[in-house]
Image (tube, helix red, strand yellow):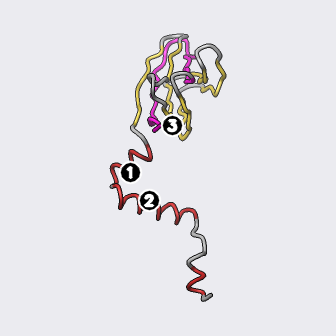
């Protein structure tokens, strides 16, 4: 077997392979459709949480989200919950941002944000809808 024939069988690096797959997908379905297929539709909103209260980051029935960013204007705690049992994920003192996470939330398992300031906070979150 010649070296040029052997080169066909040498695996590409992972980044090269990803770029080749992306280029092929772009050529076949178009950039806009590909971005929605990869990322899903964006989800972003704001919660106003009263003093010593909580609110949920919870999709409507039939949807699931991946939350990538949560920003609290003051001290807060993030829990994963099913509405009955809570498990602490993390707490922040003062204004805090959690970024580049992948919290998967459904109508049954979701995030609960708790005000720890005693005076109320604003919470901003962003993510994408998952494709089923």
User: Residue furthest toward the front?
Assistant: 1
**Which percent across, then down, holds residue 93?**
60, 25
Q: Which element type, helix, strand or loop, lies under badge 1?
A: helix
Q: Is residue 113 magenta?
A: yes
With 65 as the anchor, is 28 left or right in this view?
left
Q: Which element type, helix, strand or loop, lies under badge 3?
A: strand
With 33 as the anchor, is 64 left or right in this view?
right
Name the residue that disc number 1 marks: 34
Pick the front one: 59 or 6: 6
- Spatial CA distance of label 1 from label 2 is 9 Å
Is residue 118 shown above or below 122? above
The numbered mark, 2 or 3, whose residue comes first in the sequence reads 2
The numbered mark, 1 or 2, whose residue comes first in the sequence reads 2
User: Which segment is the magenta one?
Assistant: 109-132
Residue shown at the point (54%, 41%) measured from the top left: 100
Pick the front one: 124 or 119: 124
Name the residue that disc number 2 marks: 22
Residue shown at the point (33%, 50%) measured from the top left: 32
Q: Which quarter of the image is occupied by the N terminus? A: bottom right
């Amino acid at each position: 077997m010649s070296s040029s024939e052997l080169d066909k069988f040498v695996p590409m690096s992972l980044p090269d392979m990803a770029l080749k797959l992306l280029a092929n997908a772009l050529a076949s379905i178009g950039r806009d459709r590909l971005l929605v297929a990869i990322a899903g539709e964006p989800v972003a909103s704001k919660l106003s949480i009263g003093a010593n209260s909580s609110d949920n980051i919870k999709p409507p029935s039939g949807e699931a989200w991946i939350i990538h960013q949560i920003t609290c204007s003051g001290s807060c705690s993030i829990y994963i919950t099913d509405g009955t049992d809570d498990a602490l994920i993390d707490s922040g003192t003062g204004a805090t941002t959690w970024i580049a996470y992948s919290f998967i939330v459904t109508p049954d398992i979701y995030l609960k944000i708790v005000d720890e300031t005693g005076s109320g906070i604003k919470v901003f979150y962003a993510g994408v809808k998952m494709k089923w």
